[in-house]
Image (cartoon, coloured by chain):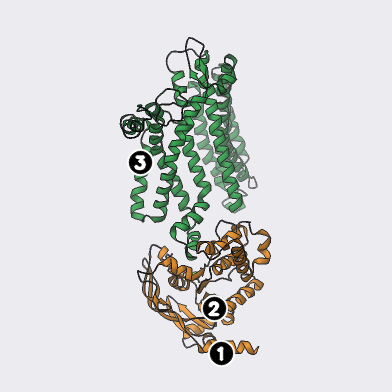
Chain colours: A orange, B green
Amino acid sequence: MEDMVHVDRAMSTEQDIKISAKGVQVHYADTHAIRDVDVDIDDKTVTAFIGPSGCGKSTFLRCINRMNDTIDIARVTGDIRIDGEDIYDPKVDPVQLRAKVGMVFQKPNPFPKSIYDNVAYGPKIHGLARNKADLDEIVEKSLRKAALWDEAKDRLTAPGTGLSGGQQQRLCIARAIATAPEVLLMDEPCSALDPIATAQVEELIDELRRSFSVVIVTHSMQQAARVSQKTAFFHLGNLVEYDDTDKIFTNPQDPRTESYISGRIG
Amino acid sequence: MQSLTTPLLLIFALAVIGYFLAKSRALHVAGGDIRTLVSLPNQHALNTALSTIVPPAAAVLLFALYARLTGGEPNWFFSLVILGLGVTGCALSLIGIKTDSRARTYAERWILGLLIFASSIAILTTIGIVFSMLFETFNFFGQYDWRDFFFSLSWSPNFRGNSDLGIIPLLWGTLYVSFIALLFAVPIGLFAAIYLSEYAGPRLRSIAKPAIEVLAGIPTIVYGLFALITVGPLLRDVFAEPMGLGQSASSVMTAGLVMGIMLIPFVSSLSDDIINAVPQAMRDGSLGLGATPSETIRQVVIPAALPGIVGAVLLAASRAIGETMIVVLGAGAAARLSLNPFEAMTTVTVKIVSQLTGDTDFASPETLVAFALGLTLFVITLGLNVFALYIVRKYREQYE
Ligand SMILES: Nc1ncnc2c1ncn2[C@@H]1O[C@H](COP(=O)(O)OP(=O)(O)OP(=O)(O)O)[C@@H](O)[C@H]1O
Ligand SMILES: [Mg+2]
C-alpha cells in the first residue's frame, strides 16, 4: 500500500508531456468535426476522452496516429507533437509513427487469420521476435494481459473472427500491445465486455501506465473516474474542459461538463 | 404451336381481369374494413392471377415435351383443356375469397414454385447437354477403341478411315495455351486490380476501370487477327528465330499471349470488386499496427479476398480452355505434342470445329469424335469448377 502511494506521488511530480496538440482542426468534406483543440497529454498517464456521441472523440484520437490519412475526405490542420516532434511533418513516416502509437478501434476488427497470427502480426512485421519461442512468448504474454489467454490457449489456431464480440475486442487489445507501442489509443475498448473482463482490461490499462501513456475513449463515467488521471470533455467538436479527473468529476468549471457528467446532456 | 397463341392470350387477359376482380371482391368481403381480412386484397389478387396463369402454362410445357417425344400437334382439344384449367383456377380462387382465407400463404407457394422452376431449368439444361453428348460419345466408342482415344499420342484423322484419334496432343495444346494465357493474365490482372482498388484515386479509377473493361468487349476474332498479323510475326522475329526455336509465326506463345490479354479484364475486374469488398476496418487494423500499405495488402487484404480471387482465376481458366478463335488464328491447326512454346499446336476446341465442318455424315468415328472431345472438355472444366468450390469452401470455413 505504501508503495502505491509512493509511486503515485512520483508520477505526479514528474509529468513529461508526451503528446502536445495545438489548434487542431479536422474537416470531413463539409463537416467540421474538430474545432481548434489544444491539449497536452502527459507521459505515463491515462487520459480519458468523454463526451456525447458524435462529438469527435474518435476523430481526435485518429489524429494522434494519423489514421485519418486513410480517409480521403478527412483534412487535418494544426500542430500535433509527440516527444516534441511534429507528426504531420512531411519527413515523418506514418508507418513508423503507427508502430509507436498503437490503437484499439471502436469496432473490433480481427484479421481473418488464426488467433495466434492476429497477435503475432505486429511483432512479425516489426521483427520484434528473434525466433519462434520468442514469438510464442510475446503472444502468450499479450493474450494474458488482455485477459484472453484462458479462453484462447486451446484454440490458438482457430480463426480470430470466430470469437465472440467481447473476445474479439480483447484480441484486438492483445494485438495492439504485442507491438509494444509507446502510446496506446483505445477507442471504447470495453464497450462489448462483461464486468469481469472490463475489470481485467482496466487492470491492464493501469499496468500499462507504468511504461506508456494511454488515451482511452469511454462512455462510462465510472470507468473514466476509475482508470484515468486526466479527463478531457468534448462537445460538438470542441474541447470544453481538460483537467485532473478528480476535478472534472467533483468540481467541473464549465456548465456543459457539469450537465454531461450529471446526465443531462448526451 | 401456332394454334396455342390465342388460348394463351385469353388466359393472360383472364388473369388480369381476375386480379382486379379478386381485389374488389376482397374489399367487398371485408365490408370496408380491411383489418378484418386475414390476407390483404393485393394478396388475394396475386393469388387469383397466379392460379389462373400457372396451371395452363405448366400444361403447355408438358404438352411441348410430349409433342417433342411423339411428334404430336396441338389441336382444339388441347386448347380447350388449357382454357378450362385457367377458368377453373380463376373461378376457384375467386370463390375462395373469405375474410379468413389464407391467400397470402397460397400466393407465397405459387411464387416459391416459380422460383424452384427457374432454378431447375439451369440444372436440367446441364443434364440435358450431358446426355445428348453422352449418347453420341457412346456411339463413337462403339466404333473406336476408348484406349486409343485416351492414350494414343497421335492425332491424324483420315476421312477414308483408319484414323488416329488420340486426344492427348489436343489436350496438351489446350492446357499449354491456357497455362501460358493464365501466366500472363493472372499476375497482370491481379496487380492492376490491386493498384486500382488500393492506390489509385477515385478520378483515375473512374477512367482506368472502364478502359480495362473495354478489352472484354472486343470480339475474340479481332484478338485472333491481332495474333495473326502482329503478335505472331513479332514473336517469331524477336524471339523464335534468333533463339533458334523455329520459324513459325503461329505458335502456342502467340495464342497464349493474346489470350492472356483477353483475360486480363476478367481477372482484374472481378478481383477489383472482391478486393473492394474487404472491409476498410481490416486495413485500418493492419495500418494501425504500423504495417505498410503493401504489407497490409499482402497479409490482410489478399488473404481475405482469396476465395473470390480463386473464383476469378478459375473463371478465366474456363474461358481459356473453351477459347477457339484465337487459337485457330494464333496457334494454327496442327496437332502436335511438343514442349517448344514457339511451335504451332492446336487445341481440343479447334479440332471439334474442324471435325464437324465440311460435308460429313454423322456416323463415322471421324465426326463422332467431336462429341467425345466435347464431353472430355466438359468433364475437365466441371472438375476445375468443383475443385474451385472445394478450395473456396475450405477457405471460408477457416476464416468466417
Ligand atoms: N469517415 C467519416 N466521414 C465523414 N464524417 C465522419 C467520418 N467519421 C466521423 N465523421 C463525423 O465526424 C463527427 C465526429 O465523429 P466521431 O466518430 O469522431 O464521434 P465520436 O465522438 O467518436 O462518437 P461516438 O461516441 O459515437 O463514437 C460526426 O459528426 C461524424 O458524423
Ligand atoms: Mg467514436
For the residues carrying marks 2 and 3, which lies nearer the camera in this image?
A: 2
Labelled pair 1, 3 in contact (Cβ < 8 Å): no
Q: How far apart are marks 1 and 2 (CA)?
A: 16 Å
Q: Is mark 3 on a helix, strand or loop?
A: helix
Q: Tags 1 and 2 in contact by the CB under 8 Å rule?
A: no
Disc 1 marks which amino acid?
A: Arg
Q: Residue A130, image x and y in percent?
A: 56, 64
Please identify the quarter of the rendering in which residue B97 is found.
top right
Q: Where is residue A65 in the image (x, y as percent from the top left)?
A: 45, 70
* Residue corresponding to mark 2: A211
| Residue A225 seen in this snapshot | yes
Query: Which x, y percent locates residue A56?
Result: 45, 73
Which of the two discs, 1 and 2, labels the residue nearer the N terminus? 1
Residue B247 picture location, percent across and down:
35, 27
1 vs 3, front mark: 1
Name the secondary structure under disc 2.
loop
Q: Which amino acid does label 2 sit on?
A: Ser
Q: Residue at x 59, y 39 (%)?
A: B110
The reply to whether label 1 and label 2 mark residues of one chain is yes
- Label disc, if present, on residue A9 of the rendered structure: 1
* Crowd tier of the residue under label 3, counting other residues whose Cα lies within 10 Å: few below 14, some 14–19, many 20 or above: few
